[in-house]
Image: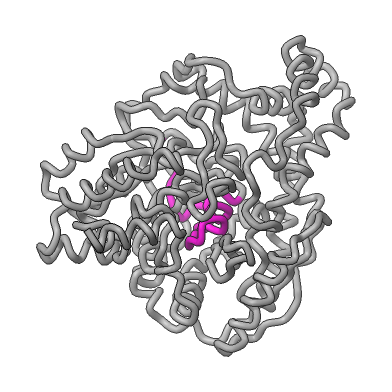
Amino acid sequence: MHFHDYLHHDATSLADLVARGEVSPHELLDTALARQAQVHGQVNAVVRLMEEQARRQLQRLLPGPFAGVPFLLKDTLQDYAGLPTTNASRAMRKHVPTEHASVVRRYLDAGLVVFGKTNLPEFALKGVTDPELFGRTNNPWNLAHTPGGSSGGAAAAVAAGIVPMAAGNDGGGSIRIPAACCGLFGLRPSRGRVSSGPDVGEVWFGASSEGVLSRSVRDSALALDVLQGAEPGDPFVIAPPAAPYAELVRRDPGRLRIGFTSASPIGTEVHPEAVAAVKHAAELLRKLGHEVEESAPEIDGALLATAYLHVYFGQVPSLVARMKAAGASGGEPELMTRLLMTLGSALKAPALTTQLAQWNTFARALGRFHQRYDMLLTPTLAHPPVRHGTGDLPAGQQALLGFLQRTGMLGLLARLGLLDSTVEQIARDNLRHVPFTQLSNLTGTPSMSVPLYWTQDGLPLGVQFVAKFGAEDRLLQLARQLEEAQPWFDRLPAMTRESAVVAAAA
């Protein structure tokens, strides 16, 4: 299959072509591999090729609704038996799981042909994708800018045309942020909708969910059908959808009540383009007949950020300890990860427990908001996709913190509470471009980033919708309506469009 033709089909359509015998899975895999080779030097989205494993898959009769469609995993939490799950960390290069993660097994059972793993920041800890182990991933819309994170490699791979859909996960915005940066659709399911097993019950105390980044809403709906449902031993089972999401997505959402805000919950600046993106979405919703007004949940955003960052800091030393116990010994983590380990180790159990208890406060407040409104609309990002290096600690500060960490002084100062202002500054800098996404993670609610806006510089800037717990069907229905009103499937980066034109002319 020529790249031009490949690019103009979503995953659902490619699977249909395979089922009708109009194209073979071998042709699709060859096309995906060729495109990966063509753009790898520019975007660096795929960090491990699995062609051998993919070819072995094609020797068997492929089952499932996505049979024959090329696919990429994210190199964290999505264990593939016999291959390292590195978490983009030198420390994890030798960590080789012995069984597939539940989500990987479900992807394979759906017939997706897994031929690689995508890049991410070390341990998925940032909203940009720049690990020292693999090098940074570039945004196909502008290579000088980040594709977001932590599923930045997945987003870049889809936007660059390597695959129509790729796997991600989202513990603080890691599906929605890169979707917003790369002009894609990204849905974060409700807590418990998709199993994190078998090695983990709940990732980040349940803040993280598995999902995909795609160019079409129907692909994400069908992928959720593939993924949803509990596995034996999961912490809890939530109610299944009334019908398959692939069917529900085709239904009219009805007239929705939507509250919107573009004010940063932590009081930081919101770029005028992000405000414009929300206003554009609100006007489009009104034209579609929805009731839209400015309103936000009564939640203290600073307290929510503090609660989130306690988990963010606190889970790092635990994660590294578990990985070392599992045999990881490939090298030392990056400086920022070591700093987070030190800061997280200084947290006392009562403080972490107190912050976890705050999650209920946020969930109740959002629940009251949803008694009046079906959805909350916000920017996904407070700023257009940033240039590489934006937000990095100055070299002098890195050197000082590195010295304090190596000598043990950092841990002592943290335990004495003498680094509180430094921690607050790191936290504020870390969230200032992405202050909107954590609400959904801590409350366990489903949310999505929808590509409805592009900046004057031609960069995507998605908007976020948050729905009631378990209401993925309403999100998908609204997304499909927006997709029909303002199509985005063929809106692609210049590097992807130009390659398609060349392929068509060849």
> Looking at the image, which is closer to me, 216 or 139?
139
Residue at image x 41%, y 68%?
Answer: 489
User: Residue 326 appears in which quarter of the rendering?
Assistant: top left
Image x and y of residue 434, in percent: 68, 52
> Looking at the image, which is closer to me, 448 or 145?
145
Residue at image x 53%, y 66%?
Answer: 451
State whether residue 92 is above or below residue 284.
above
Whether residue 168 can be seen here: yes
> Hey, which residue is sitting farthest top in the picture?
407
Image x and y of residue 8, in percent: 31, 66
Residue at image x 52%, y 52%?
Answer: 175
Count of numbered marks: 0
Q: Which residues are magenta?
A: 173-198
> Looking at the image, which is closer to me, 329 or 36?
36
- Colouring used for the render: one colour
Side of 382 relative to 503 (left or right): right
User: Residue 319 appears in which quarter of the rendering?
Assistant: top right
Image x and y of residue 126, in percent: 62, 40
Residue at image x 39%, y 40%?
Answer: 40
> Looking at the image, which is closer to me, 88 or 209?
88
**For the N terminus, which image quadrant?**
bottom left
State whether residue 117 is above or below residue 71.
above
State whether residue 273 is above or below residue 412.
below
State whether residue 463 is above or below residue 101.
below
**Magenta residue check for 177:** yes
Whether residue 207 can be seen here: no
**For the C terminus, which image quadrant?**
bottom left
**Magenta residue check for 175:** yes
Side of 116 relative to 52 (left or right): right
